């Protein structure tokens, strides 16, 4: 009977630790991506080099 109790406690502890680690990891990833968005950590990518003269050109 004692062996079953220890096995059950071990499985319960494993599930608890796994859920805590997963929750903390997910919360940290969400927080870091939100922080980057608000504080300018977003990386901008130039798709095509434009005209540097400062004028807008309409293509017809």
Image (spheres, grey):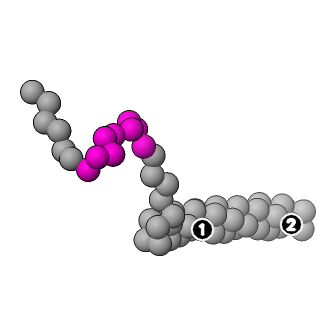
On residue 41, the disc is none
Q: Which residue is mark 2?
A: 6
Badge 2 element = helix
1 vs 2, front mark: 1
| Residue 23: % across, % down | 60, 66
Distance between mark 1 and mark 2 Cα atoms = 33 Å
Residue 17's place in the image compared with 48, above or below, is below
Which image quarter is the N terminus in?
bottom right
In the rendered image, the residue lying farthest to the front is 53
Q: Judge by depth and name the residue closer to the eye, 7 or 46.
A: 46
Residue at the spot x=43%, y=71% of the render? 38
Horizontally, residue 36 falls left or right of residue 5, namely left
Residue labelled with disc 1: 28
Identify the residue at image location x=82%, y=64%: 10
Q: Nearer the viewer, residue 48 or 8?
A: 48
Q: Is residue 39 left or right of residue 54?
A: right
Determine whether, in the image, residue 45 is placed left or right of residue 59: right
In the picture shown, does residue 46 fall above or below 38? above
In the shown orientation, is residue 35 left or right of residue 8? left
- Magenta span: predominant SS is loop
Could you tell me which residue is drawn at 57 percent across and 62 percent down?
A: 29
Above or below, comparing residue 25 to residue 49 in the picture: below
Quadrant assignment for the C terminus: top left
Local packing at callout 2 (Cα closer than 10 Å; few below 14, some 14-19, many 20+) is few
Q: Residue 8: percent from the left, percent from the top?
A: 78, 63
User: Which segment is the magenta one?
Assistant: 46-54
């Amino acid at each position: 009977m004692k062996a079953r109790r220890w096995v059950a406690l071990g499985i319960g502890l494993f599930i608890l630790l796994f859920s805590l680690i997963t929750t903390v990891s997910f919360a940290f990833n969400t927080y870091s991506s939100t922080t980057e968005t608000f504080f300018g950590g977003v990386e901008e990518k130039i798709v095509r080099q434009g005209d540097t003269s400062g004028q807008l050109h309409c293509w017809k």
